[in-house]
Structures are given as structure tokens and as C-alpha cells.
């Protein structure tokens, strides 16, 4: 499903308010000059107009430079706000939220440690929405499968580029082996898709489907070059499967929009009974939607 919609000032105001409330719940004092502070301030500015005013068109008439900066913050501010809100009651979450005072703006850099924690927060939030009990503990997350006593360890890794993915798969496998639980290796691929140390390199495509095809080429490359490491973790640890996922953002011309979509691949372990079914279920828990555009 592809959904295009007009962003309104009211939505921007809601995102800024939700993010501010979410961080205050953890006692985080946000300085105006921090990435988080600027995110709340700039998205809030877009929300300061009449509720049904379209954005960025309305802000553009007032201050083009500020609107250009603020508009690209809305998507990541919304994801972070929702992740913090839904994962807020998960045991151990405060071990992750303390990094929110650090650099985290994906438009500036994709190599910050705070973004590693944000990936874990977002995965946890999505699993909570799906009805799972989630804890932040070694290796990174532990979830309880609904209707069972089965606990699954999730080792989340966010390699800084395609060349680092193979070694991070091996690291995740070792962590799962040491957890003494069946587990899932989750690899965040956003840096691999956008691939530049100095922030996001936005895709430019005619349609969202074309943007997805461009990112799919990188996803397929990751799978082809990681086959040996995936086989190794299947042989050496109780790994149910490897899940690759990452958000890709870019500009599309038909229609003219700032578009974003999650690109993912799931590779289950075929010699473990029930692993394929559970890995398919895991993907459904995380991504009941298939793609989004705004």
C-alpha cells in the first residue's frame, strides 16, 4: 500500500508536543541547542500556524530557510516520539534514553551512537504496538511470544555501511549464543542505504516505487555479500533468522513529495522447526504497513 497525504500544521504541532512529553517523562532536560531541542523547536514552529494549513507551503511564505530545515525534521521527530511513547513502560528503557541528549539528527550524521539506541527504541515500540512484552536487556531486546512462555533475544546492529555488515552479523550471533536464548539478528540498514558520513544522501526518484527499487538493489547486495556470515551464525548459535530493515528517504516527482519507506529482508533458518513461521510473524509484528509517504 502506498499512501500520500498532505502534511498539516496541526500534525506538526502534535509531533512536537508528543516528542516533548515523551522525553520529559524520562526526566531529560533538553537544551535549546541540542539536536533534540532543535527538533522540538523547528517542528513546533511548523505547527504554529492554523491547524489545517498545509506544510511546507505555509511556512515557505514566511521563512523559506527555516521551513526547509524544519520540514525534513518532521519524519524523524515523529518516529522518535512514537517510539519513546510506545516503549516507555518497557523494563530497562532508561539505559537507552540517556543518550538522547547526544547528537542524533540523521540529516547531519548517520554514524552517531545515539542512533543505535534509537533503532532499538523504534523496534521495541513497534513490538509493543503488536502486543508483545519487551525488555531492554542483553543482547539488546528480549521479547515474549504472545500465548507462550517462549522468550526470544534480539541482537540489534546498525553497521555504518555495507562493508561492516558481515562482521556485525557475526557479533550479533555471538551475543545470541551467550544469551542462552533462541534469537533473531536484526541489522539496521539505513546507513547502508544513504551511505555518507555527513548525513543523509536523499534519493531522487520519479515515484515511491522507483525509490524502493533503488534501495532494493542495496538490500539485495547486502544479502548476496552476507551469505557466508549468515550461514556461520546459523551453525554456531540458536539463531532463528536474520532480519534486515532500514528506512529510505527521498524526493519523488510523481507526485511531488518527500517520501519514505521501510525496506526489509527476512532470512529464516530453514533447519530449525518453526523458525520460518516465527520470522514471518516477526516481520508482520514490526511492519503491519508496507510503505508510507508524506
Image (cartoon, rainbow, N blue to C red):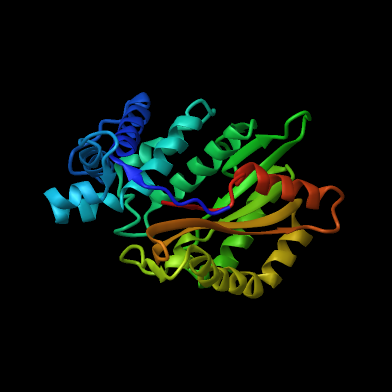
Q: Is residue 183 visible?
A: yes
Image coordinates for residue 206, horizontal then vertical, percent: 44, 70
Task: Name the residue at 18% across, 52% down.
Answer: 60
**Viewer-nearest residue: 274 or 256:** 256
Which picture quadrant has residue 51?
top left
Residue 179 as seen in the image, left or right of residue 124: right
**Viewer-nearest residue: 24 or 220:** 220
Q: Is residue 178 visible?
A: no
Image coordinates for residue 253, horizontal then vertical, percent: 39, 67
Residue 155 as seen in the image, left or right of residue 26: right
Total numbered badges shown on the rendered structure: 0
| Residue 121 vertical placement versus 199 (above, below) | above
Residue 261 as seen in the image, left or right of residue 268: left
The residue positioned farthest toward the left in the image shown: 62
**Viewer-nearest residue: 244 or 139:** 244
Task: Name the residue at 74% across, 66% down.
Answer: 231
| Residue 44 vertical placement versus 257 (above, below) | above
Image coordinates for residue 218, horizontal then vertical, percent: 54, 71
Image coordinates for residue 116, horizontal then vertical, percent: 45, 50
Amino acid at each position: 500500500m502506498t499512501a500520500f497525504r498532505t502534511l498539516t500544521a496541526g500534525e506538526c504541532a502534535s509531533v512536537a508536543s508528543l516528542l516533548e512529553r515523551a522525553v520529559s517523562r524520562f526526566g531529560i532536560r533538553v537544551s535549546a541547542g541540542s539536536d533534540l531541542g532543535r527538533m522540538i523547536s523547528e517542528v513546533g514552529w511548523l505547527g504554529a500556524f492554523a491547524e489545517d494549513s498545509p506544510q511546507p507551503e505555509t511556512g515557505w511564505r514566511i521563512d523559506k530557510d527555516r521551513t526547509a530545515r524544519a520540514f525534513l525534521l518532521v519524519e524523524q521527530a515523529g518516529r522518535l516520539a512514537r517510539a519513546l511513547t510506545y516503549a516507555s513502560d518497557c523494563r530497562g528503557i532508561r539505559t537507552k534514553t540517556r543518550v538522547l541528549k547526544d547528537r542524533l539528527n540523521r540529516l547531519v550524521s548517520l554514524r552517531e551512537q545515539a542512533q543505535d539506541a534509537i533503532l532499538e527504541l523504534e523496534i521495541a515500540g513497534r513490538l509493543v504496538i503488536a502486543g508483545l512484552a519487551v525488555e531492554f536487556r542483553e543482547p539488546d531486546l528480549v521479547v515474549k511470544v504472545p500465548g507462550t512462555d517462549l522468550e526470544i533475544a534480539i541482537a540489534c546492529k546498525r553497521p555504518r555501511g555495507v562493508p561492516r555488515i558481515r562482521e556485525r552479523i557475526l557479533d550479533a550471533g555471538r551475543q545470541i549464543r551467550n544469551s542462552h536464548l533462541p534469537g533473531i539478528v536484526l541489522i539496521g540498514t539505513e546507513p547502508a542505504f544513504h551511505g555518507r558520513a555527513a548525513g543523509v544522501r536523499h534519493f531522487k526518484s520519479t515515484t515511491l516505487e522507483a525509490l524502493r527499487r533503488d534501495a532494493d538493489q542495496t538490500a539485495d547486495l547486502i544479502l548476496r555479500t552476507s551469505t557466508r556470515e549468515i550461514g556461520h551464525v546459523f551453525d554456531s548459535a540458536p539463531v532463528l533468522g536474520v532480519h534486515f530493515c532500514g528506512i529510505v528517504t527521498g524526493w519523488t516527482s510523481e507526485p511531488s513529495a518527500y517520501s519514505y519507506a521501510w525496506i526489509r529482508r527476512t532470512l529464516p533458518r530453514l533447519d530449525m522447526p518453526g523458525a520460518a513461521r516465527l520470522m514471518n510473524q516477526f516481520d508482520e509484528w514490526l511492519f503491519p504497513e508496507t510503505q508510507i509517504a508524506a
